[in-house]
Amino acid sequence: MSDGARSAPETRAPDTRAPGIDAPDAGAPSDHDLGTWIADRRWYASKGSVPRLRTVSTDAGTRLVIDDAPAVPVLYQSPVTTDADGSLVDATTDLGWVSALAARIDASTDSLTPIGRVVAARVLTGEQSNTSVICDTESGERVIIKVFRVLHHGDNPDVTMQLALTAAGSTRVPRVYGALRAEWPDVGRPDGTASGHLAFAQEFLPGLDDAWRVALREAQAGTPFGDRAEQLGTALADVHRTLATALPTEPADAARRDAAVATMHDRLETATREAPAVAEHADAIRAVYARAADAVWPDLQRVHGDLHLGQVLAAPDPRGWVFLDFEGEPLRPLDERSLPDVTLRDLAGMLRSFDYVAGALAHEAEPVDAAAWAADARARFLQGYQRGTGVDLADHRALLDAFELDKAVYEVVYETRNRPDWVGIPSAAVGRLVGGAS
């Protein structure tokens, strides 16, 4: 879920300007000392291990270090300053460093709107993989700057898609101010250099509920969600139309279709070994996937990739629904998450999310049967999307069923491993989907 664009606990950053803001100098901590410090950070990925760091770059006002401790080395962005007694301090809590970062974003080629001078900064707490800083600017605007901790070669899809949407005039994402890219040495690449995004600045939207909370609250009260669901479908159609115009599209050739269906079958094989609820439907599921393989696929384009109700904010009218976190499925490699995909994948994710609202109510102290609520929300969501795109979803029913079924199969495995009491939610969806498709 996004660490941008919503309210969260904040900690006031000290107004200090420690040495070494632009780059570590001769007095900067050694890799060993930095390793001792980094081991306790929430965003350090190899918990329990002893970091073995080596600095690869001190350009762009930050420090990039590779940790050789894990089997696959990890590249971190870890800028630090020092306090009066020489202790290491995370530079994201330093107003001077944050101000310099904002200035570098404003000067970058990915700047859309200047952030301007930062007069105060607060770090959001509770984050795991990145660090987000809320900035009060001289103009009175509030900007959230996300500092990426684990870096990869290539464009971050969350950045590129939201940049494209904002540049195209869309209000369906928090307004983007800009982003900062950098290059660093990488002996594993043919030219010896890698590049990627270091930071991303966008509009801060405090105090807004996400669509999951709104939907759950209304389902608990027995309030129909149909109108809101239809508006959500229309909003998603708007996002997809804009992305198709702003970023490249391509035909779904045989290789891409075969790869997508093969991934579905791979997930199914895992599920049949671990989940009896899936194994008993395995042949029927394969039949759904076979129909999808033979169906007519729409052109591929950039999509959200990991869409659910928790990835959407409920902003006041006339703005309405605002979408977050375009990074795609976190377990997929970065280069795969940046490829054009099928828009129906986003629809399938949202349909599953409505089912989870109904299922969550069954686990409350006073269970509520929200099956009819979910069915109405699902139908109205698809109506809104269809009206917004002009696409007859009936023409793509076999493909949409396959994507939703694939998602439900994945959920069965996840719940079996992590929350056995919840496995009934996706299991019921598997039975419904294979029954309806047949």
Image (cartoon, rainbow, N blue to C red):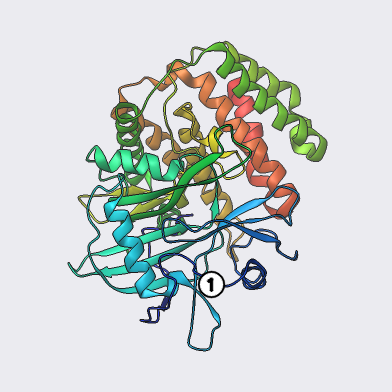
Tell me if residue 249 can be seen.
yes
Residue 40 position (above or below residue 224)? below
Residue 81, percent from left and from top = 48, 74
Classify mark 1: residues with Cα within 10 Å, few (<14), some (14-19) or many (20+).
Answer: some
Q: At x 37% / y 60%, what residue is drawn?
A: 145
Residue 347 position (above or below residue 150)? above
Residue 140 position (above or below residue 294)? below
168 to the left or right of 325:
left
For this orientation, the residue located farthest to the right is 273
Image quadrant containing the C terminus = top right
Tell me if residue 174 can be seen.
no
Q: Which residue is mark 1?
A: 28
Residue 342, percent from left and from top = 47, 26
Residue 231, percent from left and from top = 31, 41
For this orientation, the residue located farthest to the front is 26
Q: How many marks?
A: 1
Kind of residue sitting beneath label 1: Ala
Q: At x 48% / y 88%, what residue is drawn?
A: 84
Of residues 307 and 131, the one nearer the viewer is 131
166 to the left or right of 41:
left
For this orientation, the residue located farthest to the left is 139
Asked which secondary structure carries label 1, the reply is loop
Residue 96, percent from left and from top = 35, 73
The quadrant in which residue 302 appears is top left
The quadrant in which residue 381 appears is top left
303 to the left or right of 66:
left
Of residues 398 and 28, the one nearer the viewer is 28
Of residues 137 and 298, the one nearer the viewer is 137
